[in-house]
Each structure stands twice: as C-alpha cells, then as structure tokens.
Image (cartoon, grey):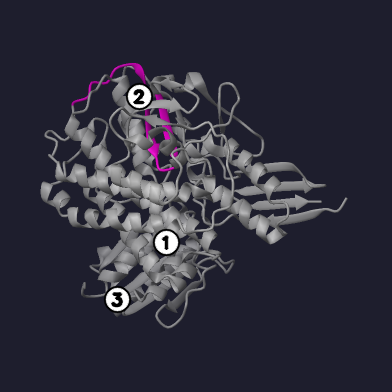
C-alpha cells in the first residue's frame, strides 16, 4: 500500500494559528484533525470575581476582528441578569455599530483572505497586481466598517464607548450623517463585489447541514433574536445550554461544540441566510439571486457570496439606521446590580456568540461561560474536510492541500476566538 | 495631508517585547514628537498612508537575531522582507500593508520602517533589557532628527 504524505506547518489566511492533520491510506480517509494548539487564554476563569460591568470590555479582548460581538453578547447577558431593558434608541445604535463590524470583518475575509483561493493567487498582494480596483474597493469598504465602529464605539478595534446598559456618550447626529454618502456607495460596491465573486469557479459540494442561527420576526438577525435550527428547534437564548454542549478533544485547545444529541452543526453566514433569507432586504435578496445562490445554500464554498450579500445588507441596514438616528438620551440606562444569571447571544460575523454569567449580589461574576462561533463549527469543519477530501482524491498533493485549506477558510475561522491561534499535515497511502 | 513626520509604534504592549513600538511612540509623544500607537488592523495602516507625507513605522521583529538588534529600511526604496515584519496573528501585518500599498500606488512620499529584535513575546508588560536599551537609544536618535 503506497503512502503519500503532505504537510503544511501553518495554515495561512485565517485569523489565528492552528494545524490540520490528514491521513489517507488505500484511498480511505483515516484521520482528519483540525487541530488548534494555541494555549487556552482562560477568559472565563479571569472573569470570575470581576465586576459584571467589566465583562463587555474584558471579553471584547478575545478578538480584534469581532469585538462588538463580545461586547454585545456580554452586555445582553448582564442586562438580562439585572432585569435591564435598554431603550429602542440604544438598541438601534448597537445594531448600527454591529453593522460596522460585519462590514469590516466580512470584507477583510472575503476579499483579502478568501478570494485568493478562487483566483489561484497566494494572497491579496498578488490580487492587487491583477485586479487593483478590487483591492482598492475592498479597502474602502473595510474602512467604512471601521469608521462606523470608530464613530460609535470610540475606536475601530476594541471599542471603548460601550457599556452595560448602553453607551458612555451618544455620537453627535452630524457624525452619523457624515457617514451617509459612503454607506450609499457601500451598498453598490458590495453588490458589485458579490457579483464579481459569483464568477469564481466553485467546487461542487453540498452537505445536509444542521444550520443554527438567531432568528428575528422583523429583522435579519445581527445583535438579537431567538436561537433556531434548520431541524425545527426554536428556543430562547437562555435555553442554549439545554440543547447545545461543548466537549474537550485531545487534539484541540478549543472546545468542540455539538448538539446535545451529538450532532455537529453549522453557524455563520450560510446558517443565517438559510434561516433568515426572507428577512433580507429585497435588494440584498436580488443580489443573492443574481449570484446564483439557492434559497438554502448548502455548498460551503459559496459562503463567500453570502458574506458579500450580508455586507450589502449591513450597508443598507446601517444607512437606514443612520438616517433614523436619534441620539439616545440618556446614552445608557441605570443599572441596579443583583444576584442572578443572565444569557446573551448575538451574530458575530462567523456565527452565534453565546455568553452566560452567574452574578452574585455584589454584582461580581461567579461563573462565566462563553461559546464562540469557531468552537461550534470545529466538528463541522472536520466533517466538511472528510467529505471534500473523499471527493477530491484524484487531485495531486498540492491541489488537495489547497482544497483542504480552502475548506477551512470557507468558515472564516477565528482561532483567536476559539482559543487563539493552524499547521496542516496530510498523510496518504 | 498632515505636516511633519509621524512616528507610529506598532505592537501589543501586553506581549512584552512586542510592545517596543508603542513604548517608543509614548516616549516620543512625551518629548513633543508626533507619534501614535497602532495595535491591530494592519490593513488600516494603508488609510494612514493616504493622509501622512512622511512616516516612520516602528515594530518588533522576530528573526533570531540578538535581542535589541536594530534594522532600518527605506521602504520607498526597498521592499520589506515579509518574514521579518509578519508578526500579526490576523494575517495582515505591517509588511503586507506596506507591500499592498506599494502595488496600489498608495505609499507616502517618505516611509522608513524600523525593526527592533525582540526576545520575549509572552503575555505581560515590560521590555527585555536589551530591547529597552536599543529603544531608548532610538528615541534619542529620532528626537535629534526632529
């Protein structure tokens, strides 16, 4: 039995570092291990004994790409524990800032880290040599997202103007109004980029995923909603741990998320789109249709298209919210600490990000449980890899390695979130 | 376009020697020099290139050279060695930003990149002795240039 071995020591164009080990023997895929070796960072432990009002700022440090997801989910959890109701103006401002995070995160991944896979290019610098306009547009879109976060959050990375109950200071209307022209440009630019990416040669693939995402009766879910699955589950955020669990596996420093029945599931753009397509704007739905996306898209390689549809939607939604902006006054609601347990969940660009805090009567955190999207997606990433490798055995080693990396990048995995830092090793015989 | 040279200290002060750039920026600020700290979002540096005519970017390097080793590059004249300036966990670091800007024709008129070899990138505050000594000498030298 001949044996082939492919080894890649660092997976590129993902957020953070980790490794992939694959062994193929006699045409059979024996081992597929998406291995995260970055040491855990113990955020849940260091939150214990801290004031619950610190949770959004501390947990936002888990990720430099999606801090708003952590800020939002943490704030919601503490607010729930303390019986705090935020005002509609504060809720709208949170959603507006979150649109900024979706725009900058999705564009960074789709145009700069993921698009090279489909273009057969090493990186975005290589894209800039063949299509500088694409890169220039991507940078401008990303800056638009950053600007939204900076105007509202005080800075684009790890915002500082947010707090449990709202914001420290409401942005002036003039600052929000100043963003309108660029948001109008962003809608058209995102659509154009989605259509450009739709011309990519996508590998044939499909999976009968269990999609898990927030759902909301009025809006495409970003910052709030109930948790739903494509298998019919529809639960309040509080019931998350009754239906989903995390388990430790020896090969990964990040916990693996599964449903309580042991099934792998998928969170992120494909799941959001599958469960919430009807809540997209008509124009975003048209872009999805023009891109050739099915109403429920099961080809993970087309997640890049859903990301760009979501960028268009985020620009539209931000424009709507910016036009209707009324500075919240006061910018935050009063807080009265009390003992209790609260849970919060929002849609990080990569999928649902769930927080649960048990808080004592002094307002200090007793226990914290944070379930980021990449942890939840790890078992499904391995299942995708096994399926795609089995269908791609005719590829030579270099092409198979490329395909494997592409599978992982379909997820825009944030290993930094799952714990922090990837290497790829493929053995076959 | 802003006037005067802007120093940008890149890195994370909570990862020891990775914070040498921010440490230098802080020292320069205290002596009245134009300086700012840049912690993440390498791609965002390109937006800075659009508004500044003259930039000095200071970052930690991790090449295996002795701690405190100083390397200076005229980034307008020479492409940056990417392995030397690729310390971002988010796959878009200083080298990527500079070389992408070069291809897009968005480099500022003057761009110097200074690297200081670090030895300790573990979580925590404070610079290694050799790194701190080099950084202090660099602050003096940059101050003299004005």
Q: Residues within 10 Å of mark 1 (few under 14, many from 20)?
A: many
Q: Do badges 3 and 2 share one subunit?
A: no
Mark pair 1, 3: CA separation: 21 Å
Residue A141 x, y percent position in the rendering:
32, 57
Determine the chain carrying the residue at label 1. Answer: B
Foreground of the two, A286 or A236: A286
Position of A215 with respect to B123 (left or right) is: left
Q: Main secondary structure of the magenta part?
A: strand
Which portion, as a residue range, is magenta? Answer: A334-357
Q: Is residue A335 above or below residue B137?
A: above
Q: Which residue is mark 1?
A: B20
Secondary structure of the residue carrying tag 3 is: strand
**Residue A260 sits in quarter:** top right
Secondary structure of the residue carrying tag 2 is: loop
Q: Is residue A189 above or below residue A36?
A: below
Question: Which numbered disc, 2 or 1, marks the residue closer to the eye?
Answer: 2
């Amino acid at each position: 039995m001949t044996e082939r071995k492919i080894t890649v020591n660092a997976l590129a164009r993902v957020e953070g570092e980790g490794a992939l080990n694959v062994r193929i023997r006699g045409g059979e895929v024996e081992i597929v291990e998406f291995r995260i070796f970055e040491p855990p960072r113990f955020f849940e432990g260091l939150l214990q004994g801290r004031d619950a009002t610190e949770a959004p700022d501390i947990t936002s440090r888990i990720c430099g790409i999606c801090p708003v997801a952590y800020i939002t989910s943490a704030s919601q959890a503490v607010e729930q524990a303390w019986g705090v109701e935020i005002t509609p103006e504060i809720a709208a401002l949170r959603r507006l800032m979150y649109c900024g995070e979706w725009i900058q995160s999705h564009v960074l991944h789709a145009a700069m880290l993921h698009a090279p896979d489909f273009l057969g290019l090493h990186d975005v610098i290589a894209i800039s040599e063949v299509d500088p306009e694409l890169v220039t547009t991507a940078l401008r879109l990303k800056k638009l997202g950053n600007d939204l976060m900076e105007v509202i959050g005080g800075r684009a990375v790890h915002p500082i103007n947010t707090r449990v109950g709202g914001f420290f200071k409401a942005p002036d209307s003039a600052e929000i109004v100043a963003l309108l022209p660029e948001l109008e440009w962003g809608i058209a630019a995102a659509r154009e980029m989605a259509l450009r990416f739709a011309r990519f040669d996508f590998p044939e693939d499909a999976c009968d995923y269990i999609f898990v995402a927030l759902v909301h009766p009025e809006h495409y879910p970003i910052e709030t909603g109930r948790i739903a699955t494509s298998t019919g589950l529809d639960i309040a955020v509080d019931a998350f741990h009754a239906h989903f669990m995390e388990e430790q596996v020896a090969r990964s420093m990040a916990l693996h998320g599964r449903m309580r029945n042991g099934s792998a599931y998928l969170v992120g753009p494909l799941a959001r789109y599958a469960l919430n397509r009807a809540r997209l704007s008509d124009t975003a739905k048209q872009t999805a249709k023009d891109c050739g996306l099915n109403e429920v898209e099961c080809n993970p390689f087309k997640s890049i298209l859903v990301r760009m549809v979501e960028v268009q939607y985020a620009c539209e939604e931000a424009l709507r919210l910016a036009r209707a902006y009324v500075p919240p006054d006061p910018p935050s609601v009063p807080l009265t600490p009390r003992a209790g347990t609260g849970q919060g969940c929002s849609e990080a660009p990569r999928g649902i990000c769930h927080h649960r805090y048990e808080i004592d009567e002094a307002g200090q955190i007793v226990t914290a449980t944070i379930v980021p999207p990449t942890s939840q997606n790890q078992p499904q990433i391995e299942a995708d890899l096994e399926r795609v490798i089995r269908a791609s055995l005719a590829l030579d080693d270099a092409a198979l390695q490329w395909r494997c990396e592409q599978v992982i990048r379909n997820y825009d995995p944030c290993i930094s979130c799952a714990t922090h830092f990837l290497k790829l090793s493929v053995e076959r015989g | 376009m802003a006037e005067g040279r802007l120093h940008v200290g890149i890195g994370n002060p909570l990862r020891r020697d990775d914070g040498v750039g921010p440490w230098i920026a802080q020292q320069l600020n205290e002596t009245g020099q134009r300086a700012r700290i840049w912690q993440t979002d390498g791609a965002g540096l390109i937006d800075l290139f659009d508004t500044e005519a003259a930039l000095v970017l200071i970052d930690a390097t991790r090449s295996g050279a002795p701690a405190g080793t100083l390397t200076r590059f005229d980034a307008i004249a020479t492409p940056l060695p990417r392995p030397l300036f690729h310390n971002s966990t988010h796959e878009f670091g200083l080298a990527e930003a500079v070389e992408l800007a070069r291809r897009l024709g968005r480099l500022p008129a003057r761009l110097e990149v200074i690297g200081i070899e670090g030895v300790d990138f573990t979580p925590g505050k404070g610079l290694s002795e050799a790194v701190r000594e080099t950084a202090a000498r660099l602050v003096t030298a940059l101050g003299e240039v004005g």
